[in-house]
Amino acid sequence: MSELVQIDGAPRPKADPKVVAGIAMNLVLVCAVSAIVLGGVYVGTERYQREARLAGERAAVSGMLALGADAQVTEVRQYLDPAKREVRYLAKQYGDESAPTRTLVFGLDGSLREAEAAPAGAAEPTGLEELGRLFVAKQGGALAGFVLEGESRGYKNRIRFFVALDSSLAVLGVRVLEHEEDPGLGAEIATPVFRAQFTGRTPDEIAALGVTRDPMPEDWHAALAAYASSTGGEAPADWRSLLERERTKPIYAVTGATISSRALTRGVKGTVDHFRRRWALLAPRLEGEGASR
Amino acid sequence: MSETTERPPGALQLLFNGIVSENPVFRLALSLCPAVAVTTTVANGFILGVAVLAVQVLSSLTVAIARGVIHPRVRIPVYTIIIAVWVSAIDMALAAFVPALYAQVGLYIKLIVAFAIIISRLEVFASRQPLVPSFWDAVGMGLGFMIALMVIGALREVLGAGSFFGIVLFKTKPLLFFALPAGGFFSIALLMAFFNALERKLTGGTAKPAAGGHHG
Protein backbone atom coordinates (compact mmCIF):
# COMPACT_ATOMS: atom_id res chain seq x y z
CA MET A 1 0.00 0.00 0.00
CA SER A 2 3.00 2.32 -0.35
CA GLU A 3 1.80 3.90 -3.57
CA LEU A 4 -1.51 5.36 -2.46
CA VAL A 5 -2.50 8.46 -4.40
CA GLN A 6 -1.98 11.71 -2.52
CA ILE A 7 -5.15 13.71 -2.34
CA ASP A 8 -4.49 16.89 -0.39
CA GLY A 9 -1.70 19.42 -0.59
CA ALA A 10 1.03 17.77 -2.58
CA PRO A 11 0.85 18.08 -6.38
CA ARG A 12 -0.53 15.06 -8.10
CA PRO A 13 2.29 12.68 -9.03
CA LYS A 14 2.70 12.03 -12.70
CA ALA A 15 1.11 8.79 -13.80
CA ASP A 16 3.71 6.16 -14.52
CA PRO A 17 2.73 4.52 -17.83
CA LYS A 18 3.91 1.17 -16.49
CA VAL A 19 1.66 1.42 -13.45
CA VAL A 20 -1.28 2.53 -15.57
CA ALA A 21 -0.74 -0.38 -17.95
CA GLY A 22 -0.54 -2.73 -14.98
CA ILE A 23 -3.83 -1.46 -13.57
CA ALA A 24 -5.51 -1.67 -16.97
CA MET A 25 -4.31 -5.24 -17.48
CA ASN A 26 -5.52 -6.08 -14.00
CA LEU A 27 -9.02 -4.78 -14.68
CA VAL A 28 -9.18 -6.42 -18.10
CA LEU A 29 -8.20 -9.75 -16.56
CA VAL A 30 -10.77 -9.46 -13.76
CA CYS A 31 -13.54 -8.53 -16.20
CA ALA A 32 -12.62 -11.32 -18.62
CA VAL A 33 -12.67 -13.97 -15.89
CA SER A 34 -15.98 -12.55 -14.55
CA ALA A 35 -17.52 -12.66 -18.00
CA ILE A 36 -16.48 -16.30 -18.46
CA VAL A 37 -17.91 -17.31 -15.06
CA LEU A 38 -21.20 -15.47 -15.65
CA GLY A 39 -21.52 -16.84 -19.16
CA GLY A 40 -20.96 -20.36 -17.90
CA VAL A 41 -23.57 -20.02 -15.18
CA TYR A 42 -26.04 -18.54 -17.66
CA VAL A 43 -25.59 -21.37 -20.13
CA GLY A 44 -25.97 -23.90 -17.33
CA THR A 45 -29.15 -22.41 -15.85
CA GLU A 46 -30.94 -20.82 -18.81
CA ARG A 47 -33.05 -23.87 -19.67
CA TYR A 48 -34.23 -24.31 -16.08
CA GLN A 49 -34.92 -20.60 -15.69
CA ARG A 50 -37.14 -20.71 -18.77
CA GLU A 51 -38.99 -23.80 -17.60
CA ALA A 52 -39.62 -22.25 -14.19
CA ARG A 53 -40.90 -19.07 -15.83
CA LEU A 54 -43.24 -20.98 -18.15
CA ALA A 55 -44.65 -23.03 -15.25
CA GLY A 56 -45.28 -19.81 -13.31
CA GLU A 57 -47.05 -18.25 -16.30
CA ARG A 58 -49.24 -21.28 -16.82
CA ALA A 59 -50.32 -21.19 -13.17
CA ALA A 60 -50.98 -17.43 -13.48
CA VAL A 61 -53.15 -17.81 -16.59
CA SER A 62 -55.40 -20.48 -15.15
CA GLY A 63 -55.44 -18.85 -11.70
CA MET A 64 -56.39 -15.37 -12.93
CA LEU A 65 -59.25 -16.70 -15.05
CA ALA A 66 -60.22 -19.37 -12.47
CA LEU A 67 -60.08 -22.00 -15.22
CA GLY A 68 -61.00 -25.63 -14.65
CA ALA A 69 -59.08 -28.63 -15.91
CA ASP A 70 -61.21 -28.83 -19.09
CA ALA A 71 -60.37 -25.30 -20.24
CA GLN A 72 -58.78 -24.77 -23.63
CA VAL A 73 -56.28 -21.96 -23.91
CA THR A 74 -54.94 -20.57 -27.18
CA GLU A 75 -51.67 -18.73 -26.99
CA VAL A 76 -51.27 -15.92 -29.52
CA ARG A 77 -47.81 -14.45 -29.99
CA GLN A 78 -47.80 -11.02 -31.59
CA TYR A 79 -45.05 -9.49 -33.67
CA LEU A 80 -44.54 -6.25 -35.55
CA ASP A 81 -42.33 -6.25 -38.63
CA PRO A 82 -39.34 -3.87 -38.51
CA ALA A 83 -40.79 -1.60 -41.19
CA LYS A 84 -43.94 -1.30 -39.04
CA ARG A 85 -46.18 -2.19 -41.97
CA GLU A 86 -47.74 -5.38 -40.75
CA VAL A 87 -48.60 -7.26 -37.56
CA ARG A 88 -48.10 -11.01 -37.40
CA TYR A 89 -50.04 -13.29 -35.08
CA LEU A 90 -48.99 -16.86 -34.31
CA ALA A 91 -51.71 -18.86 -32.59
CA LYS A 92 -51.46 -22.33 -31.12
CA GLN A 93 -52.79 -24.39 -28.26
CA TYR A 94 -51.12 -23.22 -25.06
CA GLY A 95 -48.66 -25.54 -23.37
CA ASP A 96 -48.62 -28.07 -26.20
CA GLU A 97 -45.33 -27.90 -28.05
CA SER A 98 -46.54 -30.37 -30.70
CA ALA A 99 -49.67 -28.36 -31.60
CA PRO A 100 -49.83 -26.82 -35.09
CA THR A 101 -49.41 -23.07 -35.41
CA ARG A 102 -51.72 -20.79 -37.36
CA THR A 103 -50.28 -17.58 -38.71
CA LEU A 104 -52.33 -14.46 -39.43
CA VAL A 105 -50.80 -11.34 -40.89
CA PHE A 106 -52.65 -8.03 -40.94
CA GLY A 107 -51.73 -4.74 -42.51
CA LEU A 108 -51.89 -1.73 -40.22
CA ASP A 109 -55.14 -0.71 -41.94
CA GLY A 110 -56.70 -3.92 -40.63
CA SER A 111 -56.70 -5.84 -43.90
CA LEU A 112 -55.86 -9.54 -43.76
CA ARG A 113 -52.77 -10.17 -45.84
CA GLU A 114 -51.95 -13.75 -45.13
CA ALA A 115 -53.40 -16.72 -43.29
CA GLU A 116 -51.69 -20.07 -43.13
CA ALA A 117 -51.48 -23.14 -40.96
CA ALA A 118 -47.96 -24.31 -40.21
CA PRO A 119 -47.10 -27.77 -38.92
CA ALA A 120 -45.84 -28.23 -35.38
CA GLY A 121 -42.34 -27.16 -34.54
CA ALA A 122 -42.31 -24.18 -36.90
CA ALA A 123 -39.39 -21.88 -36.21
CA GLU A 124 -39.94 -18.75 -34.17
CA PRO A 125 -39.90 -15.69 -36.42
CA THR A 126 -36.71 -13.69 -36.19
CA GLY A 127 -36.01 -10.03 -36.76
CA LEU A 128 -39.48 -9.00 -35.64
CA GLU A 129 -40.39 -6.79 -32.73
CA GLU A 130 -42.28 -8.73 -30.06
CA LEU A 131 -45.57 -7.18 -28.98
CA GLY A 132 -46.19 -9.56 -26.10
CA ARG A 133 -48.52 -12.53 -26.02
CA LEU A 134 -52.16 -12.98 -25.31
CA PHE A 135 -54.09 -16.00 -24.14
CA VAL A 136 -57.65 -16.75 -25.16
CA ALA A 137 -59.44 -19.20 -22.84
CA LYS A 138 -62.53 -21.22 -23.62
CA GLN A 139 -64.37 -23.35 -21.14
CA GLY A 140 -67.34 -25.56 -21.90
CA GLY A 141 -67.45 -24.15 -25.44
CA ALA A 142 -67.90 -20.56 -24.24
CA LEU A 143 -65.35 -17.77 -24.11
CA ALA A 144 -63.97 -17.68 -20.55
CA GLY A 145 -61.71 -14.66 -20.86
CA PHE A 146 -58.31 -13.36 -21.88
CA VAL A 147 -54.92 -12.89 -20.33
CA LEU A 148 -52.75 -10.22 -21.93
CA GLU A 149 -49.02 -9.95 -21.43
CA GLY A 150 -47.71 -6.43 -21.13
CA GLU A 151 -44.52 -4.60 -20.36
CA SER A 152 -43.78 -1.13 -19.07
CA ARG A 153 -40.66 0.77 -18.14
CA GLY A 154 -40.51 1.06 -14.36
CA TYR A 155 -38.27 3.04 -12.05
CA LYS A 156 -35.32 0.70 -12.50
CA ASN A 157 -36.06 -1.88 -15.13
CA ARG A 158 -38.96 -3.21 -17.16
CA ILE A 159 -42.09 -4.34 -15.37
CA ARG A 160 -43.67 -7.41 -16.98
CA PHE A 161 -47.28 -8.12 -16.08
CA PHE A 162 -50.43 -10.03 -16.99
CA VAL A 163 -53.88 -8.44 -17.27
CA ALA A 164 -56.86 -10.80 -17.18
CA LEU A 165 -60.08 -9.71 -18.88
CA ASP A 166 -63.51 -11.34 -18.82
CA SER A 167 -65.45 -11.94 -22.04
CA SER A 168 -66.84 -8.36 -21.92
CA LEU A 169 -63.21 -7.09 -21.70
CA ALA A 170 -63.60 -5.80 -18.11
CA VAL A 171 -60.51 -6.33 -15.95
CA LEU A 172 -60.52 -9.48 -13.82
CA GLY A 173 -57.12 -8.91 -12.32
CA VAL A 174 -53.55 -7.71 -12.80
CA ARG A 175 -50.50 -9.70 -11.81
CA VAL A 176 -46.91 -8.47 -11.85
CA LEU A 177 -44.63 -11.22 -13.13
CA GLU A 178 -41.21 -9.58 -13.11
CA HIS A 179 -39.96 -6.28 -11.83
CA GLU A 180 -36.92 -4.81 -10.10
CA GLU A 181 -38.51 -1.92 -8.23
CA ASP A 182 -37.17 -1.10 -4.75
CA PRO A 183 -38.33 -3.36 -1.94
CA GLY A 184 -40.61 -1.45 0.43
CA LEU A 185 -41.24 1.32 -2.14
CA GLY A 186 -41.86 0.59 -5.82
CA ALA A 187 -42.13 -3.13 -5.13
CA GLU A 188 -45.45 -2.37 -3.41
CA ILE A 189 -47.09 -2.18 -6.86
CA ALA A 190 -47.00 -6.00 -6.81
CA THR A 191 -49.03 -6.21 -3.59
CA PRO A 192 -52.59 -7.57 -3.85
CA VAL A 193 -54.23 -4.36 -2.60
CA PHE A 194 -52.53 -2.12 -5.16
CA ARG A 195 -53.21 -4.51 -8.02
CA ALA A 196 -56.84 -5.00 -6.99
CA GLN A 197 -57.50 -1.33 -7.82
CA PHE A 198 -57.66 -2.27 -11.50
CA THR A 199 -60.17 -5.05 -11.03
CA GLY A 200 -63.75 -4.52 -12.19
CA ARG A 201 -63.06 -1.57 -14.47
CA THR A 202 -64.42 -1.62 -18.01
CA PRO A 203 -62.15 -0.98 -21.02
CA ASP A 204 -63.57 2.54 -21.39
CA GLU A 205 -62.80 3.28 -17.74
CA ILE A 206 -59.30 1.81 -18.15
CA ALA A 207 -58.71 4.03 -21.21
CA ALA A 208 -59.52 7.11 -19.12
CA LEU A 209 -57.54 5.92 -16.08
CA GLY A 210 -55.17 8.31 -14.29
CA VAL A 211 -52.96 8.13 -11.20
CA THR A 212 -53.34 10.33 -8.14
CA ARG A 213 -51.02 10.95 -5.22
CA ASP A 214 -53.96 11.49 -2.91
CA PRO A 215 -54.16 8.97 -0.09
CA MET A 216 -56.44 6.02 -0.70
CA PRO A 217 -59.72 6.33 1.26
CA GLU A 218 -59.69 4.05 4.31
CA ASP A 219 -62.91 2.26 3.40
CA TRP A 220 -61.70 1.54 -0.15
CA HIS A 221 -58.40 0.19 1.20
CA ALA A 222 -60.27 -2.12 3.59
CA ALA A 223 -62.59 -3.26 0.79
CA LEU A 224 -59.66 -3.96 -1.56
CA ALA A 225 -57.84 -5.91 1.16
CA ALA A 226 -61.01 -7.95 1.79
CA TYR A 227 -61.41 -8.55 -1.95
CA ALA A 228 -57.75 -9.55 -2.36
CA SER A 229 -57.92 -12.09 0.45
CA SER A 230 -61.29 -13.56 -0.56
CA THR A 231 -60.78 -16.96 -2.15
CA GLY A 232 -63.04 -17.61 -5.11
CA GLY A 233 -66.83 -17.47 -4.98
CA GLU A 234 -68.71 -14.21 -4.58
CA ALA A 235 -66.75 -10.96 -4.22
CA PRO A 236 -67.33 -9.21 -0.86
CA ALA A 237 -70.40 -6.93 -0.87
CA ASP A 238 -68.44 -3.95 0.49
CA TRP A 239 -66.06 -4.14 -2.41
CA ARG A 240 -68.92 -4.35 -4.91
CA SER A 241 -70.66 -1.26 -3.58
CA LEU A 242 -67.48 0.81 -3.21
CA LEU A 243 -66.35 -0.19 -6.72
CA GLU A 244 -69.31 1.79 -8.09
CA ARG A 245 -67.96 4.89 -6.34
CA GLU A 246 -64.30 4.28 -7.27
CA ARG A 247 -64.47 2.84 -10.77
CA THR A 248 -64.17 6.21 -12.50
CA LYS A 249 -61.58 7.53 -10.02
CA PRO A 250 -57.82 7.36 -10.66
CA ILE A 251 -55.45 4.72 -9.26
CA TYR A 252 -54.09 5.71 -5.85
CA ALA A 253 -50.28 5.70 -6.16
CA VAL A 254 -48.10 3.86 -3.67
CA THR A 255 -46.72 6.44 -1.23
CA GLY A 256 -43.18 7.35 -2.29
CA ALA A 257 -43.46 5.34 -5.51
CA THR A 258 -45.44 7.48 -7.93
CA ILE A 259 -43.16 6.55 -10.84
CA SER A 260 -43.66 2.81 -10.33
CA SER A 261 -47.41 3.28 -9.85
CA ARG A 262 -47.68 5.33 -13.04
CA ALA A 263 -45.55 2.81 -14.93
CA LEU A 264 -47.84 -0.12 -14.14
CA THR A 265 -50.98 1.94 -14.79
CA ARG A 266 -49.64 3.18 -18.13
CA GLY A 267 -48.73 -0.38 -19.07
CA VAL A 268 -52.16 -1.77 -18.21
CA LYS A 269 -53.89 1.05 -20.10
CA GLY A 270 -51.79 0.56 -23.22
CA THR A 271 -52.11 -3.21 -23.18
CA VAL A 272 -55.90 -3.21 -22.76
CA ASP A 273 -56.34 -0.48 -25.35
CA HIS A 274 -54.25 -2.24 -27.98
CA PHE A 275 -55.98 -5.52 -27.31
CA ARG A 276 -59.41 -3.98 -27.79
CA ARG A 277 -58.52 -2.92 -31.30
CA ARG A 278 -56.68 -6.12 -32.19
CA TRP A 279 -59.39 -8.41 -30.89
CA ALA A 280 -61.91 -6.91 -33.29
CA LEU A 281 -59.65 -8.11 -36.13
CA LEU A 282 -58.59 -11.40 -34.62
CA ALA A 283 -61.85 -12.70 -33.21
CA PRO A 284 -63.52 -13.70 -36.53
CA ARG A 285 -60.30 -15.37 -37.75
CA LEU A 286 -59.43 -17.53 -34.77
CA GLU A 287 -61.89 -20.27 -35.70
CA GLY A 288 -64.56 -20.14 -33.10
CA GLU A 289 -62.76 -18.34 -30.28
CA GLY A 290 -64.73 -15.23 -31.18
CA ALA A 291 -67.91 -16.99 -32.23
CA SER A 292 -69.49 -16.79 -28.81
CA ARG A 293 -69.10 -13.05 -28.66
CA MET B 1 2.16 -7.87 1.15
CA SER B 2 3.21 -8.68 4.68
CA GLU B 3 0.77 -6.62 6.71
CA THR B 4 0.51 -9.26 9.40
CA THR B 5 3.48 -10.76 11.13
CA GLU B 6 1.58 -12.66 13.83
CA ARG B 7 0.09 -16.06 13.13
CA PRO B 8 -3.51 -15.95 11.88
CA PRO B 9 -6.07 -16.96 14.51
CA GLY B 10 -7.54 -20.48 14.51
CA ALA B 11 -10.83 -21.63 13.02
CA LEU B 12 -12.80 -21.76 16.27
CA GLN B 13 -11.63 -18.33 17.31
CA LEU B 14 -12.61 -16.89 13.92
CA LEU B 15 -16.05 -18.49 14.07
CA PHE B 16 -16.62 -17.17 17.60
CA ASN B 17 -15.38 -13.76 16.49
CA GLY B 18 -17.88 -13.56 13.61
CA ILE B 19 -20.87 -14.91 15.51
CA VAL B 20 -20.36 -13.23 18.90
CA SER B 21 -17.57 -10.78 19.57
CA GLU B 22 -17.69 -9.03 16.19
CA ASN B 23 -21.23 -9.92 15.13
CA PRO B 24 -21.87 -7.94 11.93
CA VAL B 25 -25.27 -6.61 13.03
CA PHE B 26 -25.12 -6.41 16.83
CA ARG B 27 -21.44 -5.48 17.17
CA LEU B 28 -20.18 -3.90 13.95
CA ALA B 29 -23.62 -2.43 13.12
CA LEU B 30 -23.02 -3.11 9.41
CA SER B 31 -25.68 -3.81 6.76
CA LEU B 32 -28.53 -2.63 8.98
CA CYS B 33 -30.72 -1.60 6.02
CA PRO B 34 -31.20 -5.16 4.76
CA ALA B 35 -31.35 -6.38 8.34
CA VAL B 36 -34.41 -4.18 8.78
CA ALA B 37 -35.91 -4.72 5.32
CA VAL B 38 -36.18 -8.50 5.25
CA THR B 39 -36.53 -9.56 8.86
CA THR B 40 -40.31 -9.48 9.13
CA THR B 41 -40.24 -13.28 9.51
CA VAL B 42 -37.68 -15.86 10.64
CA ALA B 43 -37.86 -17.63 7.29
CA ASN B 44 -37.01 -14.43 5.35
CA GLY B 45 -34.05 -13.79 7.64
CA PHE B 46 -32.86 -17.35 7.23
CA ILE B 47 -33.05 -17.24 3.42
CA LEU B 48 -31.22 -13.94 3.08
CA GLY B 49 -28.71 -15.13 5.72
CA VAL B 50 -27.90 -18.24 3.71
CA ALA B 51 -27.47 -16.16 0.55
CA VAL B 52 -25.15 -13.70 2.32
CA LEU B 53 -23.18 -16.60 3.85
CA ALA B 54 -22.68 -18.09 0.39
CA VAL B 55 -21.67 -14.77 -1.20
CA GLN B 56 -19.34 -13.94 1.70
CA VAL B 57 -17.55 -17.29 1.60
CA LEU B 58 -17.21 -17.35 -2.20
CA SER B 59 -16.02 -13.72 -2.36
CA SER B 60 -13.56 -14.13 0.52
CA LEU B 61 -12.10 -17.26 -1.04
CA THR B 62 -11.79 -15.55 -4.41
CA VAL B 63 -10.03 -12.55 -2.90
CA ALA B 64 -7.78 -14.70 -0.69
CA ILE B 65 -6.67 -16.67 -3.75
CA ALA B 66 -6.32 -13.68 -6.08
CA ARG B 67 -4.92 -11.18 -3.56
CA GLY B 68 -1.44 -11.50 -5.07
CA VAL B 69 -2.57 -10.32 -8.50
CA ILE B 70 -5.09 -7.62 -7.53
CA HIS B 71 -3.51 -4.22 -7.95
CA PRO B 72 -3.89 -2.32 -4.64
CA ARG B 73 -5.01 0.87 -6.39
CA VAL B 74 -8.05 -0.77 -7.97
CA ARG B 75 -8.80 -3.25 -5.20
CA ILE B 76 -12.20 -1.77 -4.25
CA PRO B 77 -13.65 -1.90 -7.81
CA VAL B 78 -12.22 -5.40 -8.18
CA TYR B 79 -13.85 -6.52 -4.90
CA THR B 80 -17.13 -5.06 -6.13
CA ILE B 81 -16.88 -6.98 -9.40
CA ILE B 82 -16.08 -10.22 -7.54
CA ILE B 83 -19.10 -9.77 -5.25
CA ALA B 84 -21.32 -8.86 -8.20
CA VAL B 85 -20.27 -11.98 -10.12
CA TRP B 86 -21.13 -14.28 -7.23
CA VAL B 87 -24.40 -12.49 -6.53
CA SER B 88 -25.41 -12.77 -10.20
CA ALA B 89 -24.46 -16.44 -10.30
CA ILE B 90 -26.52 -17.19 -7.17
CA ASP B 91 -29.38 -15.09 -8.55
CA MET B 92 -29.48 -17.13 -11.78
CA ALA B 93 -29.16 -20.43 -9.92
CA LEU B 94 -32.03 -19.61 -7.55
CA ALA B 95 -34.27 -18.44 -10.43
CA ALA B 96 -33.59 -21.71 -12.22
CA PHE B 97 -33.86 -24.25 -9.42
CA VAL B 98 -36.12 -22.77 -6.71
CA PRO B 99 -38.49 -20.38 -8.53
CA ALA B 100 -41.03 -20.21 -5.69
CA LEU B 101 -38.38 -19.06 -3.24
CA TYR B 102 -36.88 -16.75 -5.86
CA ALA B 103 -40.23 -14.99 -6.31
CA GLN B 104 -40.02 -13.97 -2.65
CA VAL B 105 -36.34 -13.11 -2.22
CA GLY B 106 -35.23 -12.27 -5.78
CA LEU B 107 -35.31 -8.54 -5.12
CA TYR B 108 -33.15 -8.84 -2.01
CA ILE B 109 -30.55 -11.12 -3.57
CA LYS B 110 -29.52 -8.41 -6.04
CA LEU B 111 -29.08 -5.95 -3.17
CA ILE B 112 -26.34 -8.13 -1.61
CA VAL B 113 -23.89 -6.54 -4.05
CA ALA B 114 -23.98 -3.39 -1.94
CA PHE B 115 -23.84 -5.02 1.50
CA ALA B 116 -21.16 -3.28 3.56
CA ILE B 117 -20.39 -6.38 5.61
CA ILE B 118 -19.12 -8.36 2.62
CA ILE B 119 -16.79 -5.77 1.14
CA SER B 120 -15.53 -4.83 4.61
CA ARG B 121 -14.50 -8.44 5.30
CA LEU B 122 -12.70 -8.55 1.95
CA GLU B 123 -10.80 -5.35 2.74
CA VAL B 124 -10.12 -6.06 6.42
CA PHE B 125 -9.47 -9.79 6.30
CA ALA B 126 -9.43 -11.77 3.07
CA SER B 127 -7.06 -9.38 1.26
CA ARG B 128 -4.44 -9.85 3.99
CA GLN B 129 -4.79 -13.45 5.09
CA PRO B 130 -4.27 -16.83 3.47
CA LEU B 131 -7.06 -19.04 2.16
CA VAL B 132 -7.93 -21.11 5.23
CA PRO B 133 -8.30 -18.33 7.83
CA SER B 134 -10.20 -16.26 5.22
CA PHE B 135 -12.61 -19.14 4.79
CA TRP B 136 -13.29 -19.42 8.52
CA ASP B 137 -13.62 -15.65 8.88
CA ALA B 138 -16.19 -15.62 6.04
CA VAL B 139 -18.11 -18.55 7.54
CA GLY B 140 -18.09 -16.90 10.97
CA MET B 141 -19.24 -13.53 9.66
CA GLY B 142 -21.86 -15.12 7.39
CA LEU B 143 -23.21 -17.24 10.23
CA GLY B 144 -23.13 -14.25 12.57
CA PHE B 145 -25.16 -12.24 10.06
CA MET B 146 -27.59 -15.10 9.46
CA ILE B 147 -28.14 -15.74 13.18
CA ALA B 148 -28.63 -12.03 13.80
CA LEU B 149 -31.25 -11.83 11.01
CA MET B 150 -33.05 -14.86 12.40
CA VAL B 151 -33.08 -13.50 15.98
CA ILE B 152 -34.45 -10.17 14.74
CA GLY B 153 -36.90 -12.03 12.51
CA ALA B 154 -38.06 -14.18 15.44
CA LEU B 155 -38.74 -11.15 17.64
CA ARG B 156 -40.58 -9.31 14.86
CA GLU B 157 -42.56 -12.30 13.64
CA VAL B 158 -43.73 -13.31 17.13
CA LEU B 159 -44.62 -9.76 18.18
CA GLY B 160 -45.74 -8.40 14.82
CA ALA B 161 -47.51 -11.33 13.18
CA GLY B 162 -48.17 -13.70 16.10
CA SER B 163 -46.37 -16.61 14.45
CA PHE B 164 -42.97 -18.31 14.45
CA PHE B 165 -41.44 -19.78 11.26
CA GLY B 166 -44.90 -19.54 9.71
CA ILE B 167 -46.58 -21.51 12.53
CA VAL B 168 -49.42 -19.48 14.02
CA LEU B 169 -48.95 -18.96 17.77
CA PHE B 170 -51.80 -16.53 18.46
CA LYS B 171 -54.78 -15.64 16.31
CA THR B 172 -54.20 -11.91 16.84
CA LYS B 173 -51.29 -9.73 15.82
CA PRO B 174 -49.99 -8.62 19.24
CA LEU B 175 -47.90 -5.60 18.20
CA LEU B 176 -48.22 -4.95 14.46
CA PHE B 177 -45.71 -2.11 14.86
CA PHE B 178 -42.85 -4.62 15.01
CA ALA B 179 -43.64 -5.92 11.53
CA LEU B 180 -43.25 -2.41 10.06
CA PRO B 181 -39.85 -0.95 9.09
CA ALA B 182 -39.67 1.39 12.09
CA GLY B 183 -40.30 -1.60 14.34
CA GLY B 184 -37.31 -3.28 12.71
CA PHE B 185 -34.99 -0.55 13.95
CA PHE B 186 -36.48 -0.79 17.44
CA SER B 187 -36.03 -4.56 17.39
CA ILE B 188 -32.35 -4.22 16.46
CA ALA B 189 -31.81 -1.56 19.13
CA LEU B 190 -33.51 -3.68 21.81
CA LEU B 191 -31.53 -6.78 20.86
CA MET B 192 -28.26 -4.86 20.66
CA ALA B 193 -28.88 -3.47 24.14
CA PHE B 194 -29.81 -6.93 25.39
CA PHE B 195 -26.63 -8.52 24.03
CA ASN B 196 -24.47 -5.67 25.37
CA ALA B 197 -26.00 -6.10 28.84
CA LEU B 198 -25.58 -9.86 28.66
CA GLU B 199 -21.94 -9.57 27.68
CA ARG B 200 -21.27 -7.00 30.37
CA LYS B 201 -22.72 -9.35 32.94
CA LEU B 202 -20.67 -12.30 31.68
CA THR B 203 -17.38 -10.48 31.32
CA GLY B 204 -17.77 -8.22 34.31
CA GLY B 205 -18.02 -5.00 32.30
CA THR B 206 -14.66 -5.19 30.52
CA ALA B 207 -15.96 -5.64 26.98
CA LYS B 208 -16.43 -2.68 24.69
CA PRO B 209 -20.06 -1.95 23.85
CA ALA B 210 -21.25 -2.11 20.25
CA ALA B 211 -20.29 0.91 18.18
CA GLY B 212 -22.69 1.93 15.44
CA GLY B 213 -22.45 4.61 12.83
CA HIS B 214 -21.92 2.61 9.68
CA HIS B 215 -24.16 2.62 6.69
CA GLY B 216 -25.16 -0.08 4.26
Image (cartoon, coloured by chain):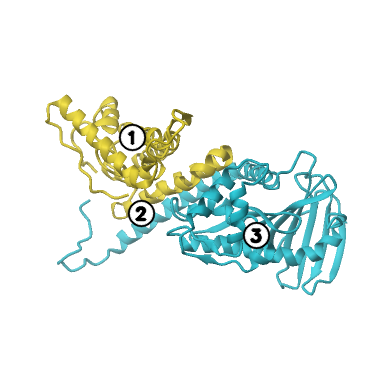
Chain ID for label 1? Answer: B
On the question of residue B126 being in view, the answer is: no
**Do the dots labelled 3 and 2 sit on one chain?**
no
Q: Is residue A217 left or right of residue A292?
A: left
* Lateral position of residue B7 relative to residue A67, left or right: left
Question: Disc 3 versus disc 2: distance between alpha carbons?
Answer: 50 Å
Colour of chain A as rendered: cyan
Task: Choose the circle earlier in sequence order: 1 or 2.
Answer: 2
The residue lying toward the viewer, choosing from A100 and B200, is B200
Colour applied to chain B: yellow
Is residue B61 toward the left or the right of residue A13 in the image? right
Question: Residue B187: horizontal and vertical position, in percent?
Answer: 31, 39
Of tags 3 and 2, which is closer to the observer?
Answer: 3
Q: Position of residue B106 (x, y in %)?
A: 50, 45
Q: Which residue is mark 3?
A: A201
The residues tagged by marks 1 and 2 sit, at their Cα atoms, a distance apart of: 28 Å
For discs 1 and 3, the disc positioned in front in the rendered view = 3
Q: Which mark is residue B148?
A: 1
